[in-house]
């Protein structure tokens, strides 16, 4: 049975986990998905263990398990009913990274992202060209749809394509399925402060994972199928360095989950790492990065987790009922699920 940690505090309307230092190695990931944590830990337990392999293994387990339908194939169909994938993996030693966005017809998004890191000088590949690259590198091409994802899309269509992410269109996107055109050639409406589509603990869409191996090398990664009924071609925060994840051996790493269209405008994972570089605790850094978002987007829903190079953990969240994340260290004996209550 997995243990639950209980320490949380309400500060300025933001809930934070009171982190302490842990011995290395360590694995931390968003949401109560301990099977992913255990897969990463098993990789770290190998004699030739390294943090990159651990993050890849953990994210792949979540993809295979289709964690809550928000990671991997068979979830979050776009407006056309197609599931596409985003993923990233970052090496905190070299500051190199590999990412894919809007990946089509290939299931192992984190594996393709790792191939981008290992076998190209680029950082990100997207869409059909990412698919072509994946096939060249031995990944099978196959449908990402399932009976469940098709049913989700059909239900959405029958509900007059509501809710959706279109604004200022003709016909009005709030009561139609399009096809859409801009209301005018000039900008006529202010952009709403955050998504009108509810983002909560049942629609969180991402695994973010941090691993630090016994030698202190750090890696971070993400994998997601994005937002349900997104506009085709949409890429979220997950594959954007500094938004969905960031890692630096000199400092630590951070991951984010929630409304990715807002988060990529603030690069909260990068901000957490930089704040820790300036001497902040992981807890204070997570809280401060979230406060920056809330200043401009007070209805924002999301959660951030920072991990220092010494294993100190801090988390902050808002807009959800609660936020749970997984931690495993040599002392824990098993994966622990830490939980905080959000404002």
Image (tube, rainbow, N blue to C red):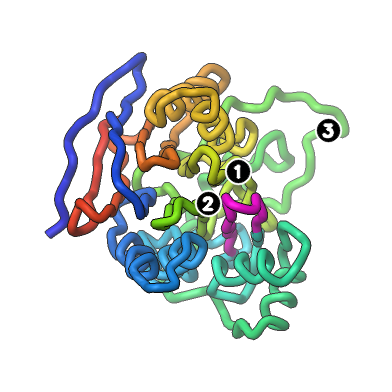
User: Which disc is residue 222 wearing?
Assistant: none
Q: Do we see residue 152 in this rendering?
A: no
Q: Nearer the viewer, residue 19 or 182?
A: 19
Q: Quadrant of the N terminus?
A: bottom left
- Of 153 and 255, nearer the camera is 255
- Please state if 155 lies on the left or on the right of 24 as rendered: right
Q: Earlier in the sequence, mark 1 or mark 2?
A: 1
Residue at the image position 51 percent from the left and 62 percent from the top = 52
Give the CA distance from mark 1 to mark 2: 10 Å
Q: Are marks 1 and 2 in contact (CB under 8 Å)?
A: yes
> In the rendered image, which quarter is residue 60 located in?
bottom left
Instruction: Look at mark 2 in the image and give the residue it sits on.
Output: 227
Q: Which residue corresponds to mark 1?
A: 165
Q: Is residue 42 left or right of residue 241?
A: left
Instruction: Out of 207 and 332, give the one closest to the viewer.
Output: 332
Q: x%, y% of residue 146?
A: 46, 75
Give the CA distance from mark 3 to mark 2.
27 Å
In the rendered view, does 310 fall on the left or right side of 169?
Answer: left
Residue for badge 3: 184
The correct choice, above or below, for 47 with respect to 164 in the image is below
For the question of whether residue 270 can be seen, the reply is: yes
Magenta range? 85-97
């Amino acid at each position: 049975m997995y243990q639950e940690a209980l320490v949380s505090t309400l500060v300025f309307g933001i809930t934070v986990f009171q982190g302490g230092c842990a011995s290395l190695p360590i694995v931390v990931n968003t949401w109560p998905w301990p099977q992913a944590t255990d897969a990463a830990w098993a990789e770290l337990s190998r004699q030739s263990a390294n943090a990159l392999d651990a993050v890849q293994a953990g994210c792949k387990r979540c993809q295979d398990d289709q964690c809550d339908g928000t990671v991997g194939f068979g979830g979050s169909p776009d407006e056309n009913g197609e599931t596409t994938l985003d993923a990233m993996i970052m090496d905190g030693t070299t500051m190199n990274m590999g990412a894919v966005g809007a990946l089509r017809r290939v299931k192992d998004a984190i594996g393709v992202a790792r191939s981008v890191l290992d076998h190209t000088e680029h950082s990100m590949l997207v869409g059909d060209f990412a698919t072509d690259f994946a096939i060249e590198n031995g990944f099978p091409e196959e449908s990402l749809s399932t009976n469940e994802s098709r049913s989700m899309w059909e239900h959405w269509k029958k509900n007059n394509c509501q809710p959706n992410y279109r604004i200022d269109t003709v016909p009005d996107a709030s009561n139609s399925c399009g096809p859409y055109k801009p209301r005018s050639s000039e900008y006529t409406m202010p952009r709403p402060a955050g998504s009108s589509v509810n983002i909560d603990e049942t629609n969180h869409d991402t695994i973010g994972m941090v691993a630090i191996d016994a030698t202190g090398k750090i890696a971070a990664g993400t994998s997601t199928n994005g937002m349900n009924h997104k506009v085709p071609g949409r890429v979220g925060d997950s594959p954007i360095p500094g938004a969905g994840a960031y890692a630096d051996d000199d400092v630590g790493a951070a991951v984010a989950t929630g409304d990715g269209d807002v988060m990529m405008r603030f690069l909260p994972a990068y901000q957490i790492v930089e704040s820790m570089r300036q001497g902040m605790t992981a807890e204070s850094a997570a809280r401060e990065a979230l406060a920056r978002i809330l200043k401009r987007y007070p209805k924002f829903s999301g959660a951030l987790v920072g991990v220092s190079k010494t294993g100190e953990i801090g988390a902050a969240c808002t807009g959800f009922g609660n936020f749970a994340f997984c931690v495993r260290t040599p002392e824990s004996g098993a994966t622990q699920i830490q939980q905080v209550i959000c404002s």
